[in-house]
Image (cartoon, rainbow, N blue to C red):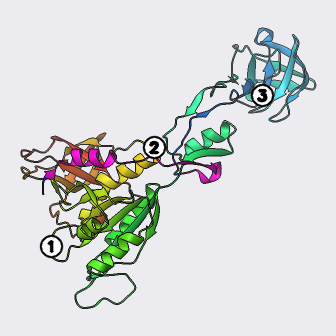
Amino acid sequence: MKLLPVIEVRARILAEAIVLPHEPVAIAQSVGRVLAEDVTAVRDQPPFAASAMDGWAVRSGDAPGVLRIVGESAAGHGFVGAVQSGEAVRIFTGASVPAGCDAVVIQEDATREGETVAVPAVASGNHVRPAGGDFKAGQTLLAKGLRIDPWRLSLAAAAGRGELRVTRRPRVALFSTGEEIIEAPAIPGPFQIYDSGSRALEALISGWGAEVVRARPVRDTMEATIQALRDADGDLVVTVGGASVGDHDLVRGAAEALGLQLKVASVNVRPGKPTFFGLLSDGRRLLGLPGNPASAMVCAELFLRPLINACLGADAGPRMIQARLDAPLGANGPREHWMRAQLNHVDGLVTARPYRDQDSSLVSVFAASDALLVRLAGAPALSAGDVVDVLPLARA
């Protein structure tokens, strides 16, 4: 099998991505969803000149002076009419600035005596938020392909949107294989281990904006594996384990029995070499991940997350950053290596320290990591302070 570099594998997978249909959702349920249309403003925000402070709305040309109080402007209850020379209006934060006024004197700087108020000199525009100061009618506020977060939700709400059109969530059918896998709280046999990889992937996939349809672990028989693939109900099918070519690695053969059109046979990467990708005869995309949890999660970050993003119409990624090594690192071997690492922030710089033990079965190392540090195939040794590329991992 030809070992393909990560960048080519990702390109082949993304070439098979299909952006899913759109659907409307209430804005309150839109966080985490990807916009399928631009969000534009239907009016200026604020729609009127508004006061930034509690105080007095005045004509700047009348200040300093003693002005006659002619009314009040509060948020939601503006002053009706125009202010004439020698007049002032009591005003509160967020209220509309009355016609004729061009400045606000804060209440601490003014002195009221009965029906008059003494104000100091003030510049035109003082403490006034101009109409359209935040955004203008017709302005594009959020672009198609953006993922909604609480801050973007706020902007869409300010634009008067109660509903947003978003891309349908991809359905990801996920199952693991192997006689050695058992799900807690069942009691494991003497040669069994708890299923940690697919449980972590379920959480990752949900966090990436897809809907997970998860099945129980599949026994190591060709018939059971074929049936599990046939029954997998999703736009994407993701398997964990059985991806290699050993006697008990049955996923690839089962997929071939269902008409697999192989696009990626294996990857020149550590960990995750057995990862494969293809199309089943009914059009479902199949990503076969290795059984070791670290291998599965690294390759999910490298390939599954970009595929889900592409199906959502979002930027596929991944989004890398640069960091400086905080310790020397030896030369890399013939496979591209995505090392679990810890990031730190020192004097405004991001530093990275890969963990010494990168064995793909170590779940504890992944739990302590907050980034993947990439070493290209055949990369030379590095010194402390050298710049490296890292992929930050989302941590709570």
Q: For the residues marked 2 and 1, what is the alpha-carbon distance in whole angstroms?
A: 37 Å
Which of the two discs, 2 and 1, sits closer to the camera? 1
Q: Position of residue 144 (x, y in %)?
A: 52, 37
Q: Residues within 10 Å of mark 3 (few under 14, many from 20)?
A: many
Q: In the displayed structure, would residue 153 be above or below residue 293? A: above
Q: Mark 1 is on which residue type?
A: Gly
Q: In the displayed structure, would residue 306 be above or below residue 156? A: below
Q: Mark 3 is on which residue type?
A: Gly
Q: Quick one: SS at disc 1?
A: loop
The label shown at residue 246 is 1
Q: Is residue 205 visible?
A: yes
Residue, far top: 61
Residue at 49% over, 41% down: 146
Q: Mark 2 is on which residue type?
A: Gly
Image quarter hosting the C terminus: bottom left
Q: Position of residue 258 (x, y in %)?
A: 32, 66
Task: Choose the circle earlier in sequence order: 2 or 1.
Answer: 1
Q: Quick one: SS at disc 3?
A: strand
Q: Any magenta on residue 207? A: no
Closest to the observer, 119 or 336: 336
Q: Which residues are magenta?
A: 3-31
Residue at 82% over, 33% down: 74
Q: Residues within 10 Å of mark 1 (few under 14, many from 20)?
A: few
Do the numbered discs 2 and 1 sit on residues whose CB atoms are within 8 Å?
Answer: no
What residue does disc 3 label? 55
